[in-house]
Amino acid sequence: MLLQCAMRVFARRGLGAARHAEIARAARVSVPTVFYYFPTRKALVSAVLEEVARFFTEMAETVHGKGGPAPELILEHLRAFAEAVDTRPEHTRILLEWSTALRNEVWPLFLRFQEQIIAALARTIRRWRLETASGRDSEAEDDARMIAATGYVLVQMKVAKLPNARIERFLHTLVHDTRHSTWRSDRQSGKRKVRTNERKQAAQESFATS
């Protein structure tokens, strides 16, 4: 109950402004009671951020733990992320602020959380590459970072109340562009390999006839 009240206060007041006394008023308990469970402001902030990280990490692990085509899983993850604006508004508001809070006490926690999301996305992308015989495993993490970063744009679109059709079009464009940039890169890589092999063969033939 106290943590839920803390989430509401932090979502309303922000990471830097929420205090024990406000949470006590929201929960209708004494201030010492809040301090009993969260002895310091650092402990209070950490508990709130850990709850935010838990929710979004579980979301990612649940989606990416399924079988099925990777593009569909990425779409499902992004849709769930966007829907959290309505279903978990406190979590989403805190996450948006956290993602831009460069203060020393909270930024390392965000980076650790973000790496967990990126790892879940990258696993799905690597599986996708294996299934499609792609050779870009080393770039799976880069693509995962791009998708993760785009998730925050998606949330902003939801907050701005853009039409769902426009948001869906945005999602499909993101996944489509990621897929086709992969295939273009693979084809270009293949062409480079062919040219390299041709040069090697020509050099060997030239050496053999000299």
Image (cartoon, rainbow, N blue to C red):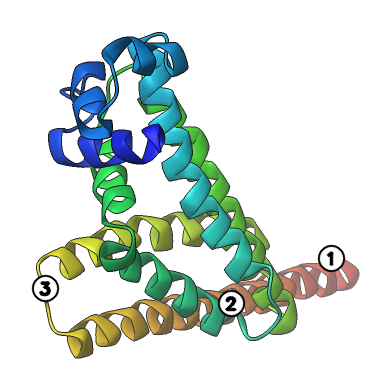
Measuring from the top left, give residue 87's x and y in whole percent.
33, 66
Of the residues shown, which amino acid type is indicated by label 2?
Asp
Residue 68 horizontal/vertical position (percent): 67, 85
Mark 3 closeness class: few <14, some 14–19, many ≥20 residues within 10 Å: few
What secondary structure is marked by label 3? loop
Taking the spot 17% from the left edge, 68% from the top edge, the residue there is 157
Answer left or right for 125 relative to 75: right
Please rate how many residues cluster around mark 2, counting C-alpha atoms within 10 Å: few if below 14, some from 14 to 19, many from 20: some
Residue designated by label 3: 161
Residue under pointer 2: 186
Picture coordinates of residue 154, whole percent (x, y): 26, 67
Q: Which residue is mark 1?
A: 207
Q: Is residue 122 above or below residue 197?
A: above
The residue furthest right is 208
Camera-nearest residue between 139 and 92: 92
Splitting the image into 4 quarters, where does residue 61 fall? bottom right
Q: Nearer the viewer, residue 161 or 102?
A: 161
Q: Amino acid at mark 1?
A: Phe
The disc, 1 or 3, on the residue closer to the chain's N-terminal end is: 3
Instruction: For the N terminus, give its image quadrant.
Output: top left
Q: Is residue 41 left or right of residue 25?
A: right
Question: Is any atom of residue 140 visible in this view?
Answer: no
